[in-house]
Image (spheres, rainbow, N blue to C red):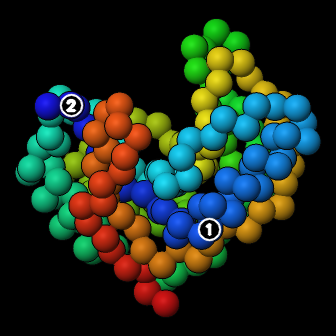
Amino acid sequence: MPGHKLFFALRPDDATADRIARFATAEHEVRGLPPRLRPSRIFHITLHYFGSFDGEPDARLVATAQRAAAEVVRPAFGLGFDRFASWGDEHARQHPFVLTGGQGLEAVRELRDALVERLVAHGLAAPERDYEPHLTLRYDKRRAPAWPVDLPGWIANEFVLVKSPQGLTRHDVIGRWPLQG
């Protein structure tokens, strides 16, 4: 049985994910970069990462995470991206190439903080470090230059708990929680 990753995320609908992929491909081609994107069906913004597990994630952890998520009450919100960036130092094996944003992702940060607060209240560990919300488009052996963009994202009206079998490029949604209109 393969291992799994477990995380909370925001996910675009299929049409929005395709729009983002088309935009990213065009931006790459204009700059002479290979547009080898991850499949748009797995585009997401991680809110909280629980880690990798040998086999299935612990059922008690999943149940606790689901109870905590059910207590998060936040409004739906629009999000957007303002920059392509390539992360990692020059010695890294893989450099994630991401869409990120300042004010356009502030509501994502607020949702993440509210979720983490509930997870901690249920006895789960807070993240070891803060992170910048982002949508990973691809990985590359070399860093790419960063450049500004103006890319509307989507209206986030739910967040999900995802179980991802390692090596299968698949995200299985195992829980959904609405963001109030």
Q: Measuring 65% from the left and 24% from the top, which residue is drawn there?
A: 140
Closest to the observer, 147 or 2: 2
Q: In which quarter of the view is residue 94 placed? A: top right
Q: List x then y, in percent, for residue 2.
A: 20, 31
In three-dimensional space, the C-alpha distance between marks 1 and 2, rounded to whole angstroms, equals: 30 Å
56 left or right of 136?
left
Identify the residue under disc 2: 2
Identify the amino acid type marked 2.
Pro
Q: Is residue 104 visible?
A: no
Residue drawn at the location 40% of the way across and 35% of the way down? 128
**Residue at the extreme right of the image, as rendered:** 30
Residue 173 is situated, as x and y percent measured from the top left of the image, at 30, 60
Label number found at residue 110: none
Label 2 packing within 10 angstroms: few (<14), some (14-19), many (20+): few
Apparent side of residue 82 relative to residue 90 in the rendered image (left or right): right
Q: Is residue 167 above or below residue 18?
A: above
The residue pinned by badge 1 equals: 16
Which three-letter amino acid code belongs to the residue tagged 1?
Answer: Thr
Q: Is residue 121 above or below residue 49?
A: below
